[in-house]
Image: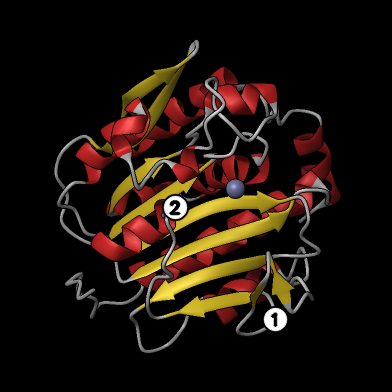
Amino acid sequence: MEPDAEKAFLTSHKSHHPRHLLARWRRVAKATGLKVGTLAKDAKYPIVCLAPQRPREGKTLYLSAGIHGDESAGILGLLIWAEENPLHLASCDVLIFPLFNPHGLAENTRRDSRQRDLNRCFHDPRSCESIQAWQDLVADRSFDACLCLHEDYDAQGCYLYELTREAKPLGPSLLDASNRYIPSDPRRTIDGRRLSARGIFQRKRSPKMPEKPEAIVLFDHHTNLSITFETPSEWSLWHRVRAQVAAIETVTRHILDDPQRTTEINP
Ligand SMILES: [Zn+2]
């Protein structure tokens, strides 16, 4: 990307200002026929979701960012991808959680205002109003793909978790795209778990965990392809955001360019 674009971004991104980011999402929604709904409130901020104003036929995508408030590149990456791809957004059935933890973002902290790690609440929705509202919203829905955007302060490059029942994994091409901005994490184990390939955890069955995060609950009940993408949060924000945009582009093109897809789920 051009140096001018990077400079303009770095002087105006306001990456920890939920109201600024939500105002930009409202403009995206207006331009693409989406409506902005409020899932719940946390402290003084709404937790919003975006979906088509009217039911749409076609591919179904689930995109989520910012459940951890100190991981701003996913939030900005999703917003910038949406601003750069209005035709994609206007042509498919999407459910977007653009900023799942606005209070955490404003405070630059992982947790919400009640010190909960929201990605550890999905196994027990009654423990958290926003996760209960999330569950009511996704209830019986299925998606062609789900993408959850994260960052990791220990990471030494990009990496991802891919849960898939598809014949061919998408992870390698996703990392290829993000490697234009940040290389893949070279570590062989992350958080004590051995990777399947450089930068990739890939599984066909969901791991057994007492506190199932968003991506696993989605794979268990709502999709055949659930990807969690991670950028290294100590690296340059510009490169992290562009790597996130590249990841979102790869997933959305994989779905939108495939005329043969079905969403039947067989967990
Ligand atoms: Zn995270």
Q: Is 14 positioned to the left or the right of 161 in the image?
A: right
SS assignment at label 1: loop
Give me the residue at 33% from left, 80% from top.
165
Q: Is 1 positioned to the left or the right of 193 in the image?
A: right
Foreground pick, 251 / 69: 69
The residue where tag 2 is placed is: 213
Foreground pick, 20 / 100: 100
Q: Is 262 positioned to the left or the right of 102 in the image?
A: left
Residue 2 lies, in percent from the top left, at 80, 53
Give me the residue at 39% from left, 60% from top.
216
For badge 2, the amino acid type reads Pro
Question: Looking at the image, is mark 2 or mark 1 nearer the viewer?
Answer: 2
The residue where tag 1 is placed is: 198
Q: Which residue, as the protein is rendered here, is positioned at the far front?
A: 210
Residue 64 lies, in percent from the top left, at 45, 46
Q: What distance separates the C-alpha of mark 2 from that of mark 1?
A: 23 Å
Give me the residue at 46% from left, 79% from top.
203
Foreground pick, 61 / 113: 113
Q: Is residue 29 visible?
A: yes
